[in-house]
Image (spheres, rainbow, N blue to C red):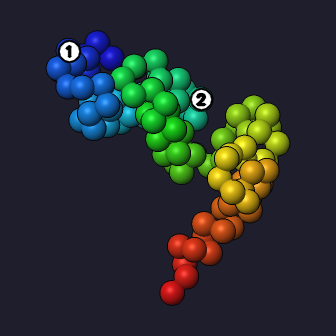
Amino acid sequence: MDELHATHGHYHWVHAIPNTALIAAALTHADGDFTGSISRTVSGGWDTDSNGATAGSIAALLTGPPPPHWTAPLKNRLSTTIADFDGTGFDTLAHLTHAEATRP
């Protein structure tokens, strides 16, 4: 992390270059560990919420579903202020997203 900050520290904290480098480094050094990927990314600083979400998404694509201790507290329900979606299950959202993505 020190090398990343030395090399890219002159960029604004939300600039794509340092954040992308941080995510790539964290994923590489986590050796396929979902929790380690997110932990390394967030502990690196910069745009922590976006980077943590991005690292988690990529780690899940590479390793499979997140461990239950990440998902169980959510009880398969989205909490949102978007009309008609509060309380919707993540499985339902995945189905709706897939249907939309594959619609001709």
- Quadrant occupied by the N terminus: top left
Q: How crowded is the residue under tag 2: few (<14 C-alpha within 10 Å), some, or many (20+)?
A: some
Mark earlier in primary sequence (2, 1):
1
Q: Look at the numbered disc 2 and give the secondary structure of its residue.
A: helix
Q: How crowded is the residue under tag 1: few (<14 C-alpha within 10 Å), some, or many (20+)?
A: few
Q: In this rendering, does residue 83 appear at all?
A: yes
Name the residue at 66% across, 41% down: 66
The residue wearing badge 1 is 6
Q: Is residue 34 above or below residue 83?
A: above
Q: Quadrant of residue 35?
A: top right
Tag shown at residue 21: none
Name the residue at 65% across, 53% down: 82
Name the residue at 54% across, 51% down: 61
Left or right: 24 in relation to 68:
left
Picture coordinates of residue 69, whole percent (x, y): 75, 32
Picture coordinates of residue 80, whole percent (x, y): 68, 46
Labels 2 and 1 touching (C-beta < 8 A): no
The residue wearing badge 2 is 35
Q: In this rendering, does residue 8 appear at all?
A: no
